[in-house]
Amino acid sequence: MAQTIVKFTAADLREMAQRYRTQLINSVTGYKSVSLIGTKNKQGIENLAVFNSIVHIGANPPLIGMISRPDSVDRHTLTNIRETGHYTINHISGEWVDRAHQTSARYPEHISEFEAVGLTASYHNDFPAPYVKESAIKLGMKLVEELSIASNGTTMIIGEVLSLTLPEACLGNDGFVDLRKAGTSAGSGLDAYHTVTELKRLSYAKPDQQPEFIITEK
Amino acid sequence: MAQTIVKFTAADLREMAQRYRTQLINSVTGYKSVSLIGTKNKQGIENLAVFNSIVHIGANPPLIGMISRPDSVDRHTLTNIRETGHYTINHISGEWVDRAHQTSARYPEHISEFEAVGLTASYHNDFPAPYVKESAIKLGMKLVEELSIASNGTTMIIGEVLSLTLPEACLGNDGFVDLRKAGTSAGSGLDAYHTVTELKRLSYAKPDQQPEFIITEK
């Protein structure tokens, strides 16, 4: 069946309505991680914010990056990370995506998004930043590097994983984590959340052989 | 039902077997974008490589980032982008995830992964880098910034979207792209690909009102 194809040029992208462009460009990077970032400022006020720009940087040492916008609700997160050096990454489950999404509202600084949206702050082993009790997979992070992106004034925050908590049922013998079993949502665009069902895993690719499906589950 | 929880400390992560850690840390960032990056070197040899570290940087100007490892098959991609200043991002459809994954094999530089894995290079409007004909969503990118990540020697490549092609059927009135309709796969870990079915979209979050589901589809 012939499909109608739409093509946008650089000029089209430059000239389109801002909101339309924001939705479009946020969508076309593909599915993405959506997680809640938990922080606390020096005065002890907790903050919780949904981020969809989390990216793997390296496994040894275990490093994870995320992009913080310069002029938004994310700022409390960035300020708190700079103040305290610590934050948490908490996966979002399908049953409460609405509560997670609600953290993106522009609450004033003295309001804890945990309370405002109905999620529970929890603390473990003297780690200074709050975890989300409802999250199945939780990471305790230490800030190790900040990079300024000159092209648009955003900041890349890189943290090292100091602590990782997850249900044993998700964890495979080889270290692979089946995110479906943790109930983790995938994100797309600015406001879309997806439950994921099908999984296919492929063997390590070598030039002289065909890849094999090592797991195929619907 | 009580779940058994596994907890890894920083020391656990440091001391575990390398392959296990690589799987684990690659998994716990959540679902992620998986796309094929198409490039061509100065001698005209095409390269195609799967990347799962694509991240939204900003919509105005439209900027997308990705992480390149220092010591891997990705190097041809990085070298070619530096040489020519251009590359393409191509979404991966569920029907041919095995061919996409196979681009991660360490083919020698003179081999085109397009031919080796059975995907088709296509060129449009004098854009210097090859697109993947089989991809439903394709982006033509220009290198605008490179950032060195000191913590582990990786590189963040930031490009501007010069061209965007997608099926009209995916594109909503507000610019949102329904990736399910494009057949785009989600990634997880190092070697897992997922078909996504359910979609929930939420209204723009405001402090004084509850979020609403504006779309809920299974």
Image (spheres, coloured by chain):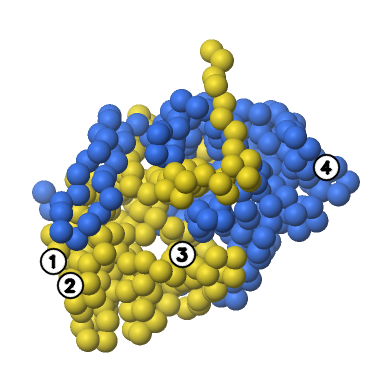
Chain colours: A yellow, B blue
In front of the other: A177 or B144: B144
On the picture, is A202 further left or further right than A94?
right
Q: Amino acid at mark 3?
A: Ile
Residue holding disc 3: A67
Q: Is residue B30 above or below residue A67?
A: above
Q: Circle 3: is it few (<14), some (14-19), or many (20+) Cα within 10 Å?
A: many
Q: Is residue B118 above or below residue A169?
A: above
In front of the other: A194 or A20: A20
On the picture, is B142 further left or further right than B111?
left
Q: Nearer the viewer, mark 2 or mark 3?
A: 2
Residue B111: horizontal and vertical position, in percent? 80, 40
Task: Tell me, yes or no, whether the two marked residues, 2 and 3, touch with CB atoms within 8 Å.
Answer: no
In front of the other: B208 or A200: B208
Q: Amino acid at mark 1?
A: Glu
Look at the image and tell me in which quarter the N terminus of chain A lies. top right
Q: Nearer the viewer, mark 1 or mark 4?
A: 1
Residue holding disc 4: B45
Q: Residue A216, can we see it?
A: no
Residue holding disc 2: A111
Task: Tell me, yes or no, whether the two marked residues, 1 and 4, touch with CB atoms within 8 Å.
Answer: no
For disc 3, the chain is A
For disc 4, the chain is B
Residue holding disc 1: A115
Task: Tell me, yes or no, whether the two marked residues, 2 and 1, touch with CB atoms within 8 Å.
Answer: yes
Q: Is residue A154 above or below residue A146?
A: above
Q: Amino acid at mark 2?
A: Ile
Q: Under tag 1, what secondary structure?
A: helix
Q: Do the residues marked 2 and 3 share a common chain?
A: yes
For disc 1, the chain is A
